[in-house]
Structures are given as structure tokens and as C-alpha cells.
Image (cartoon, grey):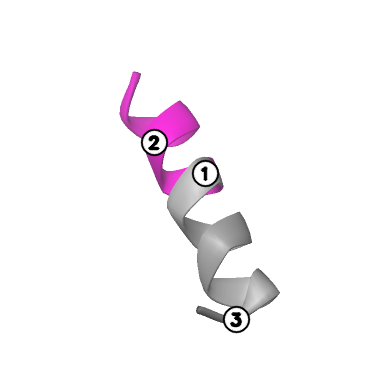
Amino acid sequence: MEPVWQAGQVLASLDMV
């Protein structure tokens, strides 16, 4: 798991909320 993917996941989760 690359850091970029993890960062994207976090951003997507925050954007979804």
C-alpha cells in the first residue's frame, strides 16, 4: 500500500462525509 493511495482514501472518506 503506497502512501499516495492511503492519502487518497483518507481524502475520499473525508469528502464523502
Residue at horizontal 42 percent and vertical 46 percent from the top: 12
Q: Nearer the viewer, residue 16 or 10?
A: 10
Q: Quadrant of residue 6?
A: bottom right
The three-letter code of the residue at mark 1 reads: Val
Q: Quadrant of the C terminus?
A: top left
The three-letter code of the residue at mark 2 reads: Ser
Query: Which residue is identified by label 1?
Result: 10
The kind of secondary structure element at disc 2 is helix
Q: Nearer the viewer, residue 5 or 17?
A: 5
Residue at the limit of the structure toward the front, as seen here: 1
Which of label 3 and label 2 is nearer to you? 3
Q: Quadrant of residue 11?
A: top right
Against 12, residue 3 (above or below) is below
Kindly check if marks 3 and 2 are in contact, taking CB atoms under 8 A apart as contact.
Answer: no
Residue at horizontal 62 percent and vertical 58 percent from the top: 7
Span colored in magenta = 11-17
Secondary structure that dominates the magenta span: helix
Magenta segment includes 13: yes
The kind of secondary structure element at disc 3 is loop
Which of label 1 and label 3 is nearer to you? 3
In-image side of 9 versus 4 (left or right): left
Against 10, residue 15 (above or below) is above
Residue at the limit of the structure toward the top, as seen here: 17
Residue at the limit of the structure toward the left, as seen here: 16
